[in-house]
Image (spheres, rainbow, N blue to C red):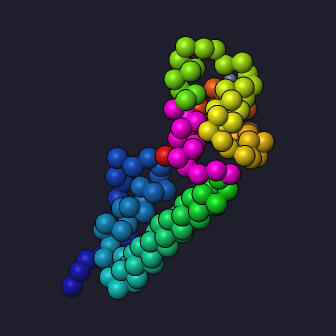
């Protein structure tokens, strides 16, 4: 026969009195422990929740990526060229707080919807040439 003590045992390492008592009871009294199968059910549902949350996260990330891709007003190669161009010029010149360099480059490579691209850049926090480089480029990674 198992001797059961309902007297809480104080365990000094826990922070508050309440949890200290509970810890003491659980450790000391096998009867008030949750049955093994119930525990594994809880653990299982925790695992399922975790897996579900992980799955939702993956799906949201994929959805955001797809939305980003379909929002692009020109192809990735051209964006890459733009970022490289801005990077090399802005190492030597100061940003004029406008899209002068961006527009110049887009026209140079024959982009026809320059206004749309600049509007898209602004919508993605590229409010001037240096911000296109600082804020927009990283969204392509
Ligand atoms: Zn700037």
| Residue 62 found in image quarter | bottom right
Q: Is residue 83 magenta?
A: yes
Range covered by the magenta-colored residues: 73-84
* Quarter of the image that includes the N terminus: bottom left
The residue positioned 55% from the left and 34% from the top of the image is: 83
In the image: residue 20, left or right of residue 129: left
The residue positioned 23% from the left and 80% from the top of the image is: 2
Q: Quadrant of ligand 1?
A: top right
Q: Is residue 42 magenta?
A: no
Q: Nearer the viewer, residue 98 or 3?
A: 98
Residue found at the very far left of the displayed protein: 1
How many numbered circles are shown? 0
| Residue 65 found in image quarter | bottom right
Q: Position of residue 116 (x, y in %)?
A: 76, 46
In the rendered image, is residue 49 in sight?
Answer: no
| Residue 41 found in image quarter | bottom left
In this rendering, the answer to whether 16 lies above or below 103 is below
The residue positioned 62% from the left and 56% from the top of the image is: 68
In the rendered image, is residue 24 in sight?
Answer: yes
Q: Position of residue 121 (x, y in %)?
A: 70, 41
Q: Position of residue 85 (x, y in %)?
A: 55, 29
In this rendering, the answer to whether 133 lies above or below 80 is above
In this rendering, the answer to whether 88 lies above or below 7 is above
Secondary structure predominantly adopted by residues drawn in magenta: helix
């Amino acid at each position: 026969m198992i001797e059961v003590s309902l007297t809480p045992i104080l365990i000094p390492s826990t922070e508050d009195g309440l949890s200290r008592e509970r810890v003491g009871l659980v450790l000391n009294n096998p009867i008030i422990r949750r049955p093994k199968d119930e525990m594994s059910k809880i653990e299982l549902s925790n695992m399922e929740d975790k897996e579900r949350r992980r799955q939702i996260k993956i799906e949201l990330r994929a959805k955001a990526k797809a939305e980003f891709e379909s929002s692009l007003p020109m192809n990735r190669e051209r964006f890459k060229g733009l970022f490289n161009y801005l990077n090399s010029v802005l190492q030597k010149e100061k940003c004029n707080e406008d899209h002068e360099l961006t527009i110049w480059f887009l026209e140079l490579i024959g982009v026809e919807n320059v206004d749309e691209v600049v509007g898209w850049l602004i919508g993605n926090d590229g409010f001037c040439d240096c911000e296109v480089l600082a804020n927009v480029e990283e969204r392509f990674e």
